[in-house]
Each structure stands twice: as C-alpha cells, then as structure tokens.
Amino acid sequence: MLRDIYPFESIIYTLYATQDLPAEITTFVKANGIEAVTMPEYKVSPNFVAKLRERVP
C-alpha cells in the first residue's frame, strides 16, 4: 500500500511491536522484498536469524 503512495527504494521492517510468529515474519519479508529487519534482543534466536538470511535477497 505504501509503495503505491511513494516508491521507497528500501524498507526496514521493525519487529518491536509485532506479535507475529517467526514463520509469518520470514514469509512477509520474502513476499515484500524487505532487505533489513530490526528487532529487540528478546526476539533474536540463531534459527530465526538464519531463516531471515535465507529469505532476504
């Protein structure tokens, strides 16, 4: 929806307020071509970070 208003060159997806599960987040990242993700320390896990790296171009 935002890209219809302005063609942002890149998007940073911030996870501080989301209740989405890691699988939902990685699917969203892949589907939307998101290249950068920020998150609070408590959400970080080696498996989650590995899955994000697989999906980020």
Image (cartoon, grey):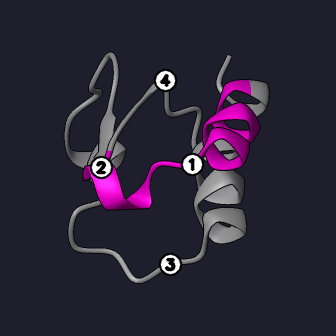
Q: Which residue is mark 3?
A: 20
What is the distance, in whole Å, between disc 2 and disc 3 at their CAs? 16 Å
Mark 4 — residue?
A: 35
Disc 4 residue type? Answer: Glu
Please tell me whether residue 41 belongs to the stretch shown in magenta: yes
Q: Secondary structure at mark 3?
A: loop
Q: Looking at the picture, how far across and down is residue 36, in whole percent?
A: 40, 27
**Residue 46 % position (x, y):** 65, 39
Figure quadrant of the C terminus = top right
Label 1 belongs to which residue?
45
Q: In front of the other: label 1 or label 3? A: 1
- Which is more foreground, mark 4 or mark 2? 2
In this rendering, position of residue 43 left or right of residue 46? left
The residue closer to the viewer here, 1 or 22, is: 22
User: What residue sits 40% from the left and 83% below the top?
Assistant: 19
| Residue ID at (66%, 52%) | 26
In terms of secondary structure, what is the magenta stretch mainly? Answer: helix
Eye-nearest disc, 2 or 3: 2
